[in-house]
Image (tube, rainbow, N blue to C red):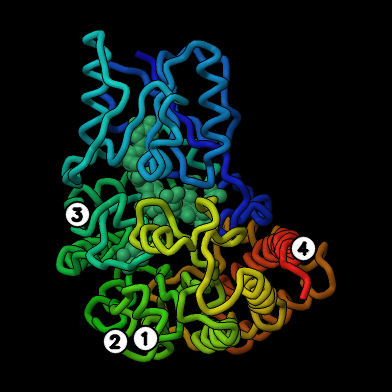
Amino acid sequence: MKIYLIAPKNPESFWTFDRVLPSLRKRCVFPNLSLPTVAGLTPAAHEVILCDENVEAVDLDTDADIVGLTGYVVHKRRILELADAFRRRGKLVVAGGPFATLCPEELRGRVDVLFVGEAEYTWPRFLRDREAGHGEAEYRQDDTPSMLDSPPPRFDLLKVDRYRSMTIQFARGCPFNCEFCDIIVMYGRRPRTKSVAQVLAEVEAIHRLGMRNIFVVDDNFIGNKKEAKELLRALSEWQQARGYPIEFMTEMSLNVAQDDELLALMKRAHFTTIFVGIESPRKASLAEANKAQNMREDLVAAVHRIQAAGIEVMAGMIVGFDSDDPSIFEEQFRFIQQARIPISMTGMLNAMPRTPLHARLKTAGRLVAESVGDQFVFTNIIPAGMSRRELYEGYRTLLRRLYGYRNYRRRSMALILNRGGLRGSRRLAGRDDLAVFRRILWTCLLRASPRRAWLTLAMCLETACRRPRALRQALTLALMHKHLYEYVRDTSRRLDVLIRELEESEPAT
Ligand code: B12
Ligand code: SF4
């Protein structure tokens, strides 16, 4: 059989960096790992073609026998459009991934075969069923597969040079139990890991493809600390033997800050950036969200300790918890500035389907709709400590302040000047780096508005004088600001519309 697997176009979001990708000569930041994984699960007797709509056009006239779609809740509209288009052409359309797993009812009847949950066992079973001439309309994986059974992803089927970074996965699942979290609904609370040998083989394959950045897309990289440390030791040796060719980033919980050995190992393995769900500086909000792991010590001190190990912290922050009143916006702003977190995914609380938060708010009559899957542009909850309008207004102001030129520059410079040294950190060197350097200067200095040019110049000059080894990071942060600033500017216009609608619907007093 010929199988055509498609990842739909990403609507623009905080993380898509669309506005700066041309400067890097890339079309997308990372590939979604689901398609190379499903391709890896496909026996060699079948032909698989991968299409990531973020880097190439979808071929609606493909002669494939089966068309497979993946995607998140934000991709809903495009998934349905593609499903309709291919079914009209008589193709067998199948779908899986986070949207299918979380909201299967929205896809039933719109695709021919639905995959709910992880597909390590169900996809091969489906292919065997098709060959045998039968098959089910829905394949469900209710318990969680072993990661030892997850095959090497078919990176060779991706148009690798169109991405900034490659993705691998070591662990699925997270041992914690945050009330709003859809990860544990989809991937469970028992952390499951690939073996060290599996991961090393994937890193080696990506290295051979000439890529230098890898995002380890784990739900929580340290869900099983013992296994994570074992992997880090092996990765350190691998890196050292080759002169540290790869920079890793990943996602993990904040308890990493209390484990010096873990931080040292991450530094040795060249993990340069981690994304951490910090959520709130307010203890009552953390307690309410069941986020006890973030209440063990002072949050600013915890973040600074990670940075002192040479690791940048990107944060996930949330406003709109029941314990949040209108003073939360100032508290969040101060925390993010003080903790020196240039890139904070600050969003509004959303209740995703099947989470405990969704069940609680539904019972209380506090849901106005289903989540659209992007916490920057909409919230489906009625907050307890303020009105919806106050939440939108306070959030809009917070976003604008965070990504205003001066506040962003202050956070970035504080990070650059205080971050611990990095083993083997790359300076600007080599022809590739210099070409990127020239393009960034072109975008952020020569062709930029005076304010953008000043931000770039000020960050570069101060770094060149005070910490010249960090010039590459200063340039990267200056470039990222272009996307974040423009994204926030456009998003706050969308929020303006929602706020106006709420004003109009409020009874006159
Ligand atoms: C990498 C990543 C990104 C990358 C995107 C890369 C890309 N090009 O798509 C970046 C950083 C850009 C990103 C952005 C966002 N992301 Co994101 N991201 C992830 C992350 C960490 C890993 C995705 C991945 O590769 N997983 C590994 C694969 C192997 O797992 P999988 O997709 O589940 O695949 C398995 C099964 O589901 C199944 N399967 C999957 N697809 C298919 C298809 C078929 C046909 C079949 C048979 C089976 C199948 O088989 C696989 C093997 O078992 C996930 C977290 C996670 N654990 O997945 C969040 C996640 C997907 N992101 C999420 C969100 C909310 C976002 C943002 C909206 C955040 C924001 N506000 O900016 C944006 C939206 C981006 C956009 N506009 O599209 C949510 C989605 C929630 C949901 N239920 O929809 C997740 C789950 C994290 C979370 N809970 O917060 N993200
Ligand atoms: S720590 Fe993160 S992944 Fe784990 S349950 Fe909480 S929000 Fe979910």
Residue under numbered circle 1: 302
Q: Residue at x 34, y 56 (%)?
A: 183
Locate the C terminus and report the quarter of the image it occupies. bottom right
Real-space CA distance between mark 1 and mark 2, rounded to the nearest whole angstrom: 9 Å
Quarter holding residue 306: bottom left
Residue under numbered circle 3: 192
Residue under numbered circle 4: 504
- The numbered mark, 2 or 3, whose residue comes first in the sequence reads 3
At label 3, the amino acid type is Arg
On the image, the x and y values in percent for residue 170 come to 26, 54
Query: Which is in the foreground here, disc 2 or disc 3?
Result: 2
Q: Residues within 10 Å of mark 3 (few under 14, many from 20)?
A: many
At label 4, the amino acid type is Glu
Instruction: From the viewer's perspective, tell me whether residue 81 is left or right of residue 212.
Output: right
As helix, strand or loop, the secondary structure at mark 4 comes to helix
Q: Residues within 10 Å of mark 2 (few under 14, many from 20)?
A: few
Q: Are marks 1 and 2 in contact (CB under 8 Å)?
A: yes
- The numbered mark, 3 or 1, whose residue comes first in the sequence reads 3
Ligand 2 within 8 Å, label 2 CB? no
Q: Is residue 490 visible?
A: no
On the image, the x and y values in percent for residue 33 come to 39, 44
Q: Are marks 1 and 4 in contact (CB under 8 Å)?
A: no
